Structures are given as structure tokens and as C-alpha cells.
Amino acid sequence: MSRVSKIILVHEGWRDSAFARGFLLAAGVDSRAIESRPNPGGSGHDWVKNQFVGEVANLIRFSEGRGVLALLDEDGKGAAEREREVEEPLKVRRLPSISARAGRCLLLPTRNLETWLYWLSAQRRGSPMEVDEVTDYKRDRPPGDVPRIQNADCRPAGEALHRLNHAEPPQSCPPMLVRALGYLRAFVNAVRR
């Protein structure tokens, strides 16, 4: 297996970082190859978008084995709109577009990361649950009778995502999570070249 030299992880907060790291480490990426770029404050959406574009520009200067992975909550705006908001500045700067297969991966937790965390945590406990991608589980009550997600649940949720079969995920798996799993697998393969 080829070595990953550097993954720049661009994220809004600690939970996003722990979740992504959980997946990457379960995929065999060395923790020293993951460099975190957390939002220093202010609008997480704007910061992630601008940082992702800047990191894509930096990728051009380096050889293979590098990539940028960003997590940006969809926040009810629609995945297509969020992607457009990132693609537009890439196009203006004449940079390559978002492509997990080329090491430029954007994950859009829909509605927010908590949707995925609740679903994956239930899978880990062996008590599958239904979640929707419209309810704001970050602010509203948790789905069903489960306790609120804690920070300690984030990394194991990322590990659980890695263990899912992306070709045949459970029927209750949120569609954007299925999409994210495919993107993450393509991304890890891209940065291992």
C-alpha cells in the first residue's frame, strides 16, 4: 500500500475533525499525515469554503500523496447549493473542481454532522434507527429515545462509517452519508498514489 504524505483536514469544529480522523485512521492513514485546519472563529461556512479553495491552490505545488478533505454542514441549503458555493471560487481562481478521486474532497453532512453521528452511533450499538436529513438534530431533540451525542461519540462514528459496505449500505442509511462514504473511499485511494 502506498504512503500518504499529507491530508489537510478543513473543518468547522472539533466534532468534524474527530469524525474525519476516525474514518481516516480506520482506513490506515497514519495520524502524522493528517494536518488539521480548524475554524478559528466566526462563520464556519465561509471559513471552510475559503480555506478549502486556498488548500486546493496549494495542492498544485506538491507531488502525489497529498489531498484536502473538507467538511461543511449543508444546514438546509441543499447539497447542490453548497457545492456551487465552493465550485464558484475555484472556477474564478482557475483551480480544479471538487473531485474526491483527485484528492479534493468536500463532504456535506445533511442537515448537519449530528444527523450522521446519531445514525452511525445507533449502528454501532446494534439498534438501527431512522433519521431524516431535514431535522436539525444539532439544535432539536435527538431522534427516538437516544441520549444527546457527546464529543466522545465522534471518532467511533467515523470508524463505524469506514466499516460500512458502501456498495450495499443499510437501507436506513441517510443518502448523503452513502455518498460521503463513496467519496471518502475514492479520496483515500487518490492520496495513496
Image (spheres, rainbow, N blue to C red):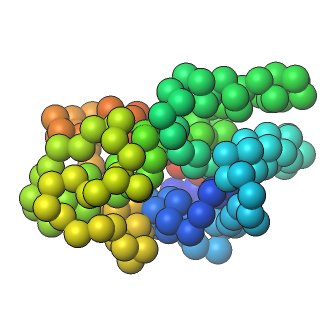
Q: Residue at x 41, y 55 (%)?
A: 139
Determine whether 160 is above or below 70 in the image.
below
Q: Position of residue 71 (x, y in %)?
A: 57, 49
Residue extending farthest to the bottom is 152
Residue 179 showing in the rendered view: yes
Q: Position of residue 159 (x, y in %)?
A: 36, 63
Q: Residue at x 30, y 68 (%)?
A: 148
Q: Nearer the viewer, residue 1 or 106?
A: 106
Determine whether 135 is above or below 85 in the image.
below
Residue 29 showing in the rendered view: no
Determine whether 112 is above or below 145 in the image.
above
Q: Is residue 181 left or right of residue 49?
A: left
Q: Is residue 149 left or right of residue 127?
A: right
Looking at the rendering, which quadrant does residue 93 occupy? Answer: top right
Q: Position of residue 26 (x, y in %)?
A: 41, 64
Q: Position of residue 153 (x, y in %)?
A: 35, 71
Number of numbered callouts drawn: 0
Residue extending farthest to the left is 127
